[in-house]
Amino acid sequence: MKNQTVKQLVEGAALAAVFGVLFLITTYVPLLGSLTLWTLPVPFILMMVRNGPGSGFVMWGVTIVLGFLIAGIPSLIASLTFGLGGLTAGYLYYSHKSALAVLIGSSVAYVISLVLVFISSILLIGQNPADLAVEMLNQSIRQAESLSNVLGQDSNRFDQLLEQVGVIRYLIPTALVMLGVAIALISQLISVPVLKRVGGFKPPVFKPIREWAFPKSFLWYYLVVTILMMVGLEEGSTAFVAAINVYSILNALIFVQGLAVIYFFSHQKGWPLVVPILLTLLGFALTTFVVIIGIIDLGFELRRRMKS
């Protein structure tokens, strides 16, 4: 029992050190840091899976305290955010939940953390960071417009850009949700080979993309929100903010549904994997087309018809 406790302490210290190194790289080596950012939750996932909740939370507490003493507020934010998400994913793995359950649970944890960080930043600086970002973008666009006028070029497109930038402040909830899901998904994909190789654990994996499907009810939600957007809600109102965020999130989900159809069609045709990957990259340039495919699949079960 004593040896087991010592082993857990040593392992926790080692994984906390790994997190510290990854955090320093992420902070001070910009190019490499853009990659190591997604690995920050992995030490917490590994600790939780190998040693259980008690050891995982002890490691989290030590990481928070030592990180704050050594690197200050940035380390505190990273430890809280990635620690909570990583421990949530690790606990769900530890409880033998499905890959989808791990993704949903850790996504919720990351979104909660990001919302708390966002609110804290407003309280600390006394201003909404989104407003600051919008103001900086507006200044850049106005400078570009002035230069365009000097060169005698048409500046009407800059007015459209200013209108689009003005909407950004209302999409903060969508941005936080998307970022939370992205961190959860990428860190989960990275953790799978690590858990197999180092953790001695076989984590659950996702179904092939071609089998992914969302409930048909999403289509009705999408249609209702689209109609509300077309009616013309007052910009800045609660209804407008809610509608534009729900619309954006549903649009992203239906886009994924459309990609699933593309992968299914490629599988049916027996095409090599590189083909649907290239089509996916092309799909980001043709978002509307992929969304239409997703809508058709939700409404008319396009993949079932392809199969038959």
Image: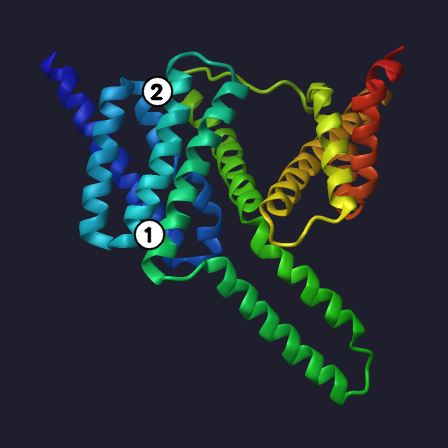
Splitting the image into 4 quarters, where does residue 244 fall? top right
What residue is drawn where x is 84% and y is 14%? 304
Who is closer to the viewer here, 10 or 147? 147
Instruction: Name which residue type carries label 1.
Output: Leu
Query: Label 1, label 2: how many angstroms apart (C-alpha)?
Result: 24 Å
> From this viewpoint, is residue 270 visible?
no
Q: Where is residue 199 in the image (x, y as percent from the top left)?
A: 36, 21
Q: Horizontally, is 249 left or right of 231 in the view?
A: left
Q: Does residue 54 appear left or right of residue 241 in this picture?
A: left
Residue 281, horizontal then vertical, whole percent: 74, 43
Residue under numbered circle 2: 49
Residue 24: image tag: 1
Residue at image location 40% in from the left, 32% down from the top: 85
Contact check, label 1 and label 2, Cβ < 8 Å: no
**Residue 122 position by quadrant:** bottom left
Protein image colouring: rainbow
Label annotation for residue 78: none
